[in-house]
Image: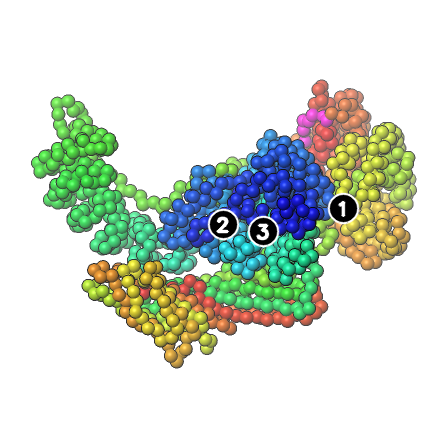
């Protein structure tokens, strides 16, 4: 299965290596570096790179390449999924998964990797099991440990490892019992030149933060469960109940976890909460181009559109852009030709706009491609699909938990062609 | 150094630095001696880090690494399961060949550990040892076989992984565990699910019939498969109705696999979803493949999901393009083409090239849009980007080949382009086009040749070859104008640096220029060069890989990766499905159940077995008489038996005598073994279960007890699980007087708690249909330390299905199940030799099972054979004239079917076993059990 793992940063240095079988020389990464060089963008590195004796499978997260070395047949998705799980675990432990965080916690990282794979096959990937084996570092614990000489490593087999609910440890205790659920929906859309929607889909997730004492058994029901046409669950969700009653019934893991991710298909009409008016043009023979962009809200059900960020890759021929925003700030990087405009909140009374001119390389001919505009935004208190949680009930424990639910809509891959 | 210090904190700090060095890839091997010393350190974190270090460098420093082995051996016996497991992990990860035997022993021991976590680690260790020393394979396969029988979800994934790495071709090991694996699947952790599903895909391909072969009547099977989600009963009913109409009926086991994997499509793990998808793709009837995302036509509604964003990584773009191209049809082609047009403007040039090829493929596949596509591509010829133009030329060339007559203007247009296009492939394509269709452009062609002759020396090789080609073709069609030019080009080529080009020139000159020597070929030159060529097929770059299992690395690379197991073709006829029948109780739950402590233990088969034997021995050593526990328990259950004894017939008394005789023999055997047994038994009582040395003890038992044919005690409730209440049961082989169709099960309760147990009774029996149970009268009070024995009757309906019920005390309820071995489902029948022959004559053909076997070492005489057969099954001996033959007869308890068994011995340890029984299942299972008993 997975032979070795190399962590490579953006500048191409291997800053961590771990081997689960015999040692594979890091020179195997040369094939990977070649592939990185060939790729125009960091994301374009092929995920699976065959080499004469090994196969390299990589994922790029937080500007770090996680390169796994494979020697024999294994489903590539298996490896990719596992690498993502590694990153998620690091994030869970250190808050962020950056090169600095990994280097600072190199021992914990190593202990984690040691537990997650045995002989290249996953052993413990469930976060609550790992946390019992290896306690996440906190400042307090570090201080205590140096004084008392106690360790970060658990001495007993985690209870979850042997139970039928491996995702939850026994003996959880809280003074404040609370369960929070975030319904977050992302709109993936392509809007064409004329402003009509070519394709739009909603990818939603329900993330939960559950801090409940004991072994609570929760059920979550929706007002309109039929909306969800493609769902995937955390292993804790009882599939049969969902099939039969469209109810989520589960014994939750302790802490943060993703309960459900779902998909609302392109078949359903998706409300697009923002429109973009644009006029980007280049004239033949002239070394100037016009750039005009106006944003406005639509179908937002009265909610404010916030944290709006516009970015666009301008054609290579553009030397510089001289623009003036009606609000927010913009930057243009003359090397990467990336224009980004941090708009902030859209005020329906005074629509934000960005206008001005672009200067082209002299003598260069008019670029034949028009840039696409990528949009990011957030709308609080709105699930754009209309999904609504009906109620949350708890069984199995006596206390009354505090329950909360939050909705949010975000732009996913939201693109406007010009 | 810090490592030598006495303080753990300093050691820890030192180890942390060393591990940081290893992580950075720096060599820390010279610290080996200093580090190894700390392997026995008390501080668990230091210990772990030392393990990390050891595993990394042990291979380089083999001698020093050996110093640490004893620590791990000690660790293997630690009462803490985590420490046992990690000791095994490290021990098996140290790649030092000398310790192979130690590893082997450790793995074997761990495979029967009571902690499933340790057993999981043992499964992981198997491939490690196998890669270190492939010669251990046979022994390891035995361990795999043992672990495959394990019923915990924790072990299942890991052992299948070991199976896949060590002996993927031993499909036979799966049979018995197939249904269990299917049922466990949903509760196995996600990584194990992937491995199991992939393995089962292969398994199913060898065991079941192709569901798509005989299914021509589409209409009927739709109704059938629509019922997929409905109740089992409905389905069964439908299957039976279908049976009448159609030859193909899906094996229920095949259906089981499909049904049990389906919910996993909702997994959060993409690898699991992919595994299920490929399983459906390879195994499901066509009509059902739809649920994984539907064959091509059914993807259509999702067309727009595959539209490409400028921010997608290139490889995603290319894949999406492939999907879009495959989805294109008359109805949607215009939208797709419009979409493609946007792609051509992209800044990503590789992607643009791929888009142009995609347009070409759409044009070839869909005749209606060929002209539109062609026009679009021709427009691209004036694109500023040379790459775009070049790619278009190549695609246009292919398209034109399909209908050149109508497109001479395009060819002319392209001829003009030769001045501007520099990309060799495109230039070569244009030249080929002009040469091929020179008759459509008679005026331009010679002019192009003139230009090319001028630039010949500066062209790339592929262009040069095409120039020669063009020259040859023109020479053949229009020799007047081009004769000299051709000569000139051929002369240039003759002195080219590239030998291919020189060869080609020489060859072509011989072929086209008539000389005295040139033979018959010359006449055919025109036919050779200007033959009609078949239009090329524009193919997907992703074709040709369907023979690989979907979702595998090999499939992705389109090359066989090491360790890839071919997906076999469906068999012509299905192998015997009964191989998957299992007699062991099927307590596996497909549903996720709420956590109950006992479950963790209930599945520890080996452990349970062990306890049974230990307890049997303890009983015996207590009584001190040396007689087998069988006799002890006979007396214990006397209450109900005294009545029965009245009904006993004369022949039964004969049987009694025989029993007596046996007991005497046992006595002899047992006294020999007793010393050892007492010793070990004692040890077991004292030592905590965690720490016993399993290997030693079990080996003692296998020597002493197995041959003696005791009545076996089975555990119903372990004393830990039962919170002090230990319950065992045995099949007393006495008729159950209240109901002769029931099997008597003798249950012994031992109260090990320090309080009284009250109101002991049975509740809520859950039985297979037809099965019945006669409960015992409630035991009001059981004082501490006392044992009570009762007898219950169960009508198993002549099946080995377990009878499940709840055992209740005044405080608790325990789920228990009684599982009868097939041999206990019968009661002795007394026949004469003639009767036996007569009855046997009636049970021929289907009802007779013949099996050859080799007798085990200890089966030296008739005596032992009789003993073993009667120990396996509750049968009586039938007199027989020949001393080479032993005959036994019995009746099934529930329905009274005769069971006849004959063992014929031959010279040299060979033997033949014949079982005649109307109930074939019983017959088959009995054969198996007896075979096992005799070949031990």
Q: Residue at image x 77%, y 44%?
A: B689
How packed is label 3: few (under 14 Cα within 10 Å), some, or many (20 or more)? some
Residue B685 shows in the view: yes
Q: Is residue B425 above or below residue A411?
A: above
Task: Report the residue marked by disc 2.
Answer: A15
Asked if badge 1 and badge 3 are on a common chain, one would say no
Q: Nearer the viewer, residue B138 or A33?
A: A33
Q: Position of residue A41 (x, y in %)?
A: 38, 54
Looking at the rendering, the stretch of residues picked out in magenta corresponds to: B849-856
- For the residues labelled 2 and 1, the Cα–Cα distance comes to 58 Å
**Where's the N terminus of chain B, which quadrant?**
top right
Q: Position of residue B517 (x, y in %)?
A: 15, 22
Q: Quarter of the image holding residue A95? A: bottom right
Front position among marks 2 and 1: 2
Chain letter of the residue beneath label 3 in the structure image: A
Mark 3 / mark 2, whichever is N-terminal: 2
- For the residues labelled 1 and 3, the Cα–Cα distance comes to 51 Å
Label ID, residue B684:
none
Q: Nearer the viewer, residue A269 or B151?
A: B151
Label ID, residue B818:
1
Task: Report the residue marked by disc 3.
Answer: A107
Judged from the image, the secondary structure of the residue bearing numbered disc 2 is: strand
Q: Residue at image x 29%, y 42%?
A: B536
Q: Is residue B779 left or right of residue B209?
A: right
**Where's the C terminus of chain B, which quadrant?**
top right
Q: Residue farthest to the top?
A: B907
Q: Is residue B361 above or below residue B855?
A: below
Q: Is residue B932 left or right of residue B418?
A: right
Asked if badge 3 and badge 2 are on a common chain, one would say yes
Q: Is residue B739 magenta?
A: no
Judged from the image, the secondary structure of the residue bearing numbered disc 1 is: strand
Chain letter of the residue beneath label 1 in the structure image: B
């Amino acid at each position: 299965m997975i032979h070795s793992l190399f962590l490579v940063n953006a500048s191409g240095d291997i800053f961590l290596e771990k081997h689960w079988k015999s040692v594979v020389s890091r020179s195997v990464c040369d094939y990977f570096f070649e592939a990185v060089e060939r790729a125009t963008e960091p994301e374009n590195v092929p995920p699976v790179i065959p080499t004469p004796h090994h196969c390299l499978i990589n994922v790029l997260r937080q500007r770090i390449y996680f390169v796994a070395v494979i020697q024999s047949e294994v489903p590539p998705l298996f490896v990719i999924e596992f690498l993502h799980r590694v990153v998620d675990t690091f994030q869970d432990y250190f808050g962020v998964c950056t090169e600095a965080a990994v280097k600072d916690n190199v021992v914990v990282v190593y202990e984690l990797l040691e537990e997650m794979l045995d002989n290249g096959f996953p052993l413990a990937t469930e976060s609550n099991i790992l946390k019992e084996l290896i306690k996440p570092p906190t400042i307090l614990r570090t201080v205590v440990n140096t004084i008392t000489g106690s360790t970060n490593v658990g001495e007993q087999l985690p209870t979850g490892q042997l139970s039928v609910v491996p995702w939850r440890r026994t003996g959880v205790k809280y003074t404040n019992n609370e369960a929070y659920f975030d319904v977050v929906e992302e709109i993936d859309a392509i809007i064409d030149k004329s402003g009509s929607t070519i394709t739009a889909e909603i990818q939603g997730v329900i993330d939960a933060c559950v801090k409940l004492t004991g072994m609570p058994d929760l059920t979550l029901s929706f007002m309109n469960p039929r909306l969800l046409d493609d769902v995937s669950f955390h292993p804790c969700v009882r599939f049969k109940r969902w099939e039969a009653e469209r109810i989520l019934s589960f014994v939750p893991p302790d802490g943060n976890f993703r309960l459900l991710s779902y998909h609302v298909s392109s078949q359903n009409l998706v409300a697009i909460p923002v429109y973009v008016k644009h006029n980007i043009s280049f004239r033949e023979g002239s070394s100037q181009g016009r750039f005009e962009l106006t944003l406005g809200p639509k179908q937002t059900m009265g909610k404010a559109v916030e944290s709006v960020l516009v970015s666009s890759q301008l054609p290579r021929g553009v030397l510089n852009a001289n623009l003036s925003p009606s609000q927010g700030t913009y930057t243009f990087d003359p090397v990467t030709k990336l224009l980004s405009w941090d708009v902030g909140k859209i005020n329906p009374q005074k629509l934000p706009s960005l206008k001005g001119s672009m200067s082209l390389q002299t003598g260069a001919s008019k670029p034949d491609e028009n840039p696409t505009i990528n949009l990011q935004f957030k709308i609080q208190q709105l699930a754009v699909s209309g999904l609504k949680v009906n109620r949350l009930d708890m069984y199995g424990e006596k206390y009354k938990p505090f329950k909360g639910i939050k909705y949010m809509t975000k732009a996913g891959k939201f693109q406007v062609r010009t | 150094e810090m490592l030598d210090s006495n303080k753990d904190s300093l050691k820890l700090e030192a180890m942390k630095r060393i591990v940081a060095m290893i992580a950075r890839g720096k060599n820390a091997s010279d610290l080996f001696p200093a580090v190894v010393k700390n392997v026995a350190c008390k501080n668990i974190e230091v210990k772990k880090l030392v393990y990390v270090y050891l595993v990394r460098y042990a291979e380089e420093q083999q001698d020093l690494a050996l110093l640490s082995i004893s620590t791990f051996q000690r660790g293997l016996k630690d009462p803490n399961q985590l420490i046992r497991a990690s000791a095994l992990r490290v021990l098996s990860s140290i790649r030092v060949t000398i310790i192979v035997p130690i590893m082997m022993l450790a793995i074997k021991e761990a495979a029967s550990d009571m902690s499933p976590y340790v057993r999981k680690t043992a499964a992981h260790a198997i491939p490690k040892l196998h890669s270190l020393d492939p010669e251990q394979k046979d022994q390891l396969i035995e361990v795999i076989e043992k672990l495959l029988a394990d019923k915990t979800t924790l072990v299942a994934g890991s052992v299948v992984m070991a199976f896949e790495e060590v002996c993927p071709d031993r499909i036979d090991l799966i049979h018995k565990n197939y249904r269990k694996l299917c049922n466990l699947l949903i509760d196995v952790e996600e990584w194990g699910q992937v491995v199991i599903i992939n393995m089962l895909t292969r398994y199913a391909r060898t065991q079941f019939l192709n569901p798509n072969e005989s299914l021509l009547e589409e209409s009927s099977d739709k109704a059938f498969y629509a019922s997929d989600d409905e109740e089992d009963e409905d389905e069964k009913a439908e299957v039976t109705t279908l049976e009448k109409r159609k030859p193909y009926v899906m094996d229920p086991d095949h259906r089981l696999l499909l049904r049990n994997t389906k919910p996993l499509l909702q997994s959060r793990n993409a690898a699991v979803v992919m595994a299920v998808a490929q399983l459906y793709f390879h195994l499901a009837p066509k009509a059902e493949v739809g649920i994984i995302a539907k064959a091509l036509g059914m993807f259509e509604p999702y067309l727009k999901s595959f539209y490409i964003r400028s921010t997608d990584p290139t490889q995603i773009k290319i894949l999406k393009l492939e999907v879009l191209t495959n989805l294109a049809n008359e109805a949607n082609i215009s939208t797709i083409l419009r979409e493609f047009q946007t792609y051509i403007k992209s800044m990503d040039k590789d992607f643009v090239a791929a888009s142009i090829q995609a347009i070409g493929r759409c044009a070839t596949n869909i005749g209606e849009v060929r002209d539109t596509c062609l026009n679009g591509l021709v427009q691209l010829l004036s694109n500023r980007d040379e790459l775009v133009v070049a790619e278009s030329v190549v695609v246009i060339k292919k398209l034109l080949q399909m209908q050149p007559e109508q497109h001479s203007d395009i060819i002319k247009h392209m001829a003009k382009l030769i001045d501007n296009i520099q990309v060799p492939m495109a230039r070569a394509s244009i030249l080929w086009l002009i040469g091929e269709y020179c008759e459509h452009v008679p005026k331009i062609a010679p002019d192009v040749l003139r230009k090319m002759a001028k630039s010949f020396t500066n062209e790339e090789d592929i262009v040069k070859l095409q120039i020669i080609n063009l020259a040859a073709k023109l020479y053949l069609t229009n020799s007047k104008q081009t004769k000299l030019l051709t000569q000139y080009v051929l002369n240039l080529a003759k002195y080219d640096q590239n030998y291919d080009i020189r060869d080609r020139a020489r060859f072509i000159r011989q072929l086209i220029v008539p000389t005295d020597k040139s033979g018959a070929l010359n006449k055919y030159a025109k036919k050779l060069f200007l033959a009609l060529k078949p239009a090329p097929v524009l193919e997907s770059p992703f074709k040709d890989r369907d023979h690989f299992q979907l979702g595998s690395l090999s499939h992705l690379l389109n090359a066989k990766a090491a360790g890839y197991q071919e997906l076999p073709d469906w068999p012509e006829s299905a192998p015997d499905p009964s191989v998957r029948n299992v007699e062991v109780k099927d307590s596996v739950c497909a549903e996720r159940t709420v956590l109950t402590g006992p479950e963790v233990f209930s599945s520890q088969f080996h452990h349970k077995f062990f306890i049974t034997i230990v307890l049997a021995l303890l009983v015996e050593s207590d009584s001190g008489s040396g007689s087998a526990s069988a006799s002890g328990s006979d007396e214990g259950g006397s209450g109900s038996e005294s009545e029965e004894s009245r009904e006993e017939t004369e022949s039964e008394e004969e049987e009694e005598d025989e029993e007596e005789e046996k007991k005497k023999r046992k006595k002899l055997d047992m006294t020999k073994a007793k010393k050892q047994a007492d010793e070990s038994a004692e040890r077991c009582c004292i030592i905590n279960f965690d720490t016993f040395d399993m290997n030693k003890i079990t080996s003692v038992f296998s020597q002493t007890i197995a041959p003696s044919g005791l009545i076996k005690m089975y555990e119903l409730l372990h004393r830990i699980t039962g919170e002090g209440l230990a319950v065992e049961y045995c099949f007393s082989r006495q008729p159950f007087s209240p109901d002769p169709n029931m099997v008597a099960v003798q249950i012994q309760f031992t109260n090990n708690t320090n309080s009284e147990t009250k109101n002991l009774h049975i509740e809520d029996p859950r039985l297979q249909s037809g099965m019945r149970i006669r409960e015992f009268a409630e035991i009001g009070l059981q004082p501490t330390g006392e044992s009570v024995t009762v007898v219950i009757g169960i009508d198993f309906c002549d099946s080995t299905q377990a009878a499940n019920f709840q055992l209740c005390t005044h405080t608790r309820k325990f789920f228990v199940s009684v599982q009868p071995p097939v041999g206990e489902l019968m009661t002795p029948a007394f026949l004469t030799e003639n009767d036996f022959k007569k009855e046997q004559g009636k049970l021929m053909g289907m009802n007779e099972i013949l099996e050859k076997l080799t007798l085990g070492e200890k089966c030296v005489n008739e005596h032992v054979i009789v003993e073993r057969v009667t120990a396996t099954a509750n049968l009586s001996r039938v007199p027989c004239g020949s001393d080479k033959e032993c005959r036994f007869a019995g009746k099934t308890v529930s329905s009274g079917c005769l069971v006849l068994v004959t063992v014929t011995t031959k010279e040299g340890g060979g033997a033949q076993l014949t079982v005649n029984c109307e109930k074939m299942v019983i017959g088959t299972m009995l054969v198996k059990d007896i075979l096992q008993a005799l070949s031990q």
